[in-house]
Amino acid sequence: MSKNLRGGTHTTLTETATLVVSVLESIPLVKRISPGIINQSSRRSGARRVTATFTNAGLELSITGQGSQKVAVHAAPEDTSTIFKLLSTHKRLGEFSFTSRDRKPGI
């Protein structure tokens, strides 16, 4: 892994989040990737979705598939839209649906 993944090799990612994080690791604007707790989905639709929430620290990605997991992506605030665009247009993530929203208190 080239990026600083908080928790090192002891942090677990869902199968869906692993695909997204592998793409994030190839983006040079990303400073740090911090996986969150894995939650089991009550729905079994299997649809792969990524919802990006733009924050003051970067992006918070809510990744759903077989389960759900939040992944924090630390980057400069001016780089977050570029990172999201690169992520949402990447050919390896073609079967994902992407949405975004802003959550920036104080701005």
Image (tube, rainbow, N blue to C red):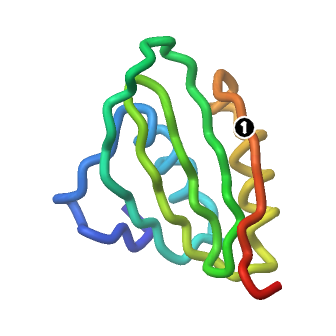
Residue 48, quarter of picture: top right
Residue 54, quarter of picture: bottom right
Left or right placement of residue 48 versus residue 103 in this view? left
Left or right placement of residue 9 versus residue 63 in this view? left
Residue nearer the viewer, 1 or 71:
71
In terms of secondary structure, where does tag 1 sit? strand
Kind of residue at badge 1:
Phe
Residue 29, quarter of picture: bottom right
The single residue placed furthest to the top in the displayed view is 45
- Placement of the C terminus among the 4 image quadrants: bottom right
Query: What residue is shown with label 1?
Result: 98
Up/down of 86 relative to 8, above or below = above
Q: Residue at x 33, y 39 (%)?
A: 39
Up/down of 107 relative to 84, above or below = below
Q: Residue at x 36, y 67 (%)?
A: 5
Residue nearer the viewer, 57 or 25:
57
Count of labels in the image: 1
Q: Residues within 10 Å of mark 1 (few under 14, many from 20)?
A: some
